[in-house]
Image (tube, helix red, strand yellow):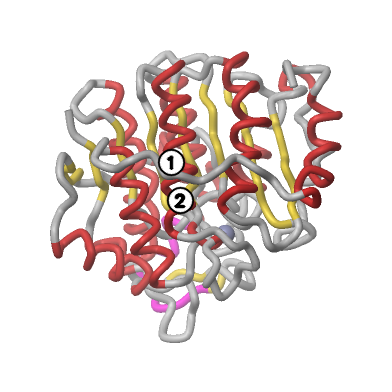
């Protein structure tokens, strides 16, 4: 069984011009290391565009219509950080559709697990609004596809991007069939993701936010994933794990402030892979979100692929948080102790 990699040059056509930090060179550096030598037991997946119906699982029909009408325009600003150029609509449809295709191939046993190297990213995109470099919420569309078309009832979305995945949180805030778990820098862009945002109505307890100050490293992240997400996942027993993999927690990231090294991405992948093996028949899909350091992107993706394809040692990093980190996660545990065995 292989590890699938969604990789396609059409994602490079979403190009906002030199100087925009979310540029095609982000994928070019990852493509370059993969092309130098496809990691063993990996196979490429060709994306397909998401249909209007699929995008409307998450997005308002008026919004999907608006974006489709802007296709091919030279330059349109959607939000102060988010714009479209001629190739953007096709890239955005392929980003959501490529994520769906990878999820389907995992469900059908054609690949064991996968990484979707897509852009534009998705986790900030709201139901009717582009935000923070994101046009369509790729991971949310794929989660909804797994529920509506593949009959799954419990999906875990783990979001380790530096920024809070506000769009994903809002898509599933009132539901328990998708559990959203996010670690992110706080206070920080986009402003949401405080620990008291824990879901509501039927979804109460199924949104878990771990806001963190800057400076968290490999050992902190391993501790948080083990001691907070671990018991929650054991009780929830997800049937599929989707990961919003943002490489902007890398120590050298220009937007960052976190201290994760490339080995740290192997740690996070290994923790989630173990959960997928325990509860989800190994079904796990990593979807690219942010990450703006060429080294962090290229080395981070390689570390994730090495874990997924089973070709790497388990990273030797202790699950040992600093006293500061323990203080910061205490209110998260307090809020969620009434829902989960924490
Ligand atoms: Zn980010």
The answer to whether mark 1 and mark 2 are in CB contact below 8 A is yes
In the image, residue 51 lies in the stretch drawn in magenta? no
- In the image, what residue occupies the spot 52% across and 63% down? 250
Q: Relative to residue 310, is residue 135 drawn left or right?
A: right
Say which element carries label 2: helix
SS at circle 1: helix
- Asked if residue 200 lies left or right of residue 127, the reply is right
**In the picture, residue 69 is in which quadrant?**
bottom left
Query: What span is in magenta?
Result: 67-76
- Residue linked to disc 1: 269
Rendered position, 139 above or below 85: above
Q: Residue at x 17, y 28 (%)?
A: 1
Circle number at residue 265: 2
- Residue 325: image location, x then y, percent: 76, 48
x and y percent of residue 87 in the render? Answer: 33, 67
Residue 121 coordinates in the image, percent (x, y):
47, 56
Q: Who is closer to the viewer here, 9 or 128?
A: 9
Pointer 1 local density, CA inside 10 Å: few below 14, some 14–19, many at least 20: many
Q: How far separated are the C-alphas under marks 1 and 2?
A: 6 Å
Using the image as rendered, state which of residue 150 and residue 67 is in the foreground. Answer: 150
Label placed on residue 108 = none
């Amino acid at each position: 069984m292989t590890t699938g990699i969604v990789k396609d040059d059409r994602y490079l056509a979403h190009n906002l011009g030199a100087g925009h930090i979310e540029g095609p060179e982000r994928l070019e550096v990852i493509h370059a290391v993969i092309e130098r030598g496809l990691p063993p037991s990996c196979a490429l997946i060709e994306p397909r565009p998401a249909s209007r119906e699929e995008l409307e699982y998450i997005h308002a029909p008026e919004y999907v219509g608006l974006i489709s009408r802007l296709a091919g325009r030279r330059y349109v600003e959607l939000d102060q950080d988010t714009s479209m150029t001629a190739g953007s609509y096709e890239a955005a449809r392929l980003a959501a559709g490529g994520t769906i295709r990878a999820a389907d191939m995992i469900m059908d046993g054609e690949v064991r697990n996968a990484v979707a190297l897509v852009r534009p990213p998705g986790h900030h995109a709201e139901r009717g609004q582009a935000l923070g470099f994101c046009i369509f919420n790729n991971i949310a569309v794929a989660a909804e596809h797994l529920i509506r078309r593949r009959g799954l009832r419990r999906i875990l979305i783990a979001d380790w991007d530096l920024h809070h995945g506000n769009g994903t949180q809002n898509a599933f805030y009132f539901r328990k069939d998708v559990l959203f778990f996010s670690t992110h820098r706080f206070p920080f862009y986009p402003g949401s993701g405080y620990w008291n945002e824990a879901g509501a109505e039927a979804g109460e307890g199924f949104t878990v936010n771990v806001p963190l100050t800057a400076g968290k490293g490999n050992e902190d992240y391993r501790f948080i994933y083990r001691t907070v997400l671990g018991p929650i996942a054991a009780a929830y027993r997800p049937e599929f794990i989707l990961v919003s993999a943002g490489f902007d927690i890398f120590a050298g990231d220009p937007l960052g402030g976190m201290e994760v090294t490339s080995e740290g991405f192997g740690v996070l992948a290994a923790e989630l892979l173990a959960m997928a093996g325990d509860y989800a028949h190994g079904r796990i899909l990593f979807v690219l979100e942010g990450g703006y350091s060429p080294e962090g992107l290229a080395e981070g993706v390689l570390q994730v692929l090495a874990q997924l394809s089973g070709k790497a040692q388990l990273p030797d990093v202790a699950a040992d948080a600093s006293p500061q980190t323990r203080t910061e996660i205490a209110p998260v545990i307090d809020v969620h102790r009434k829902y989960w065995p924490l």
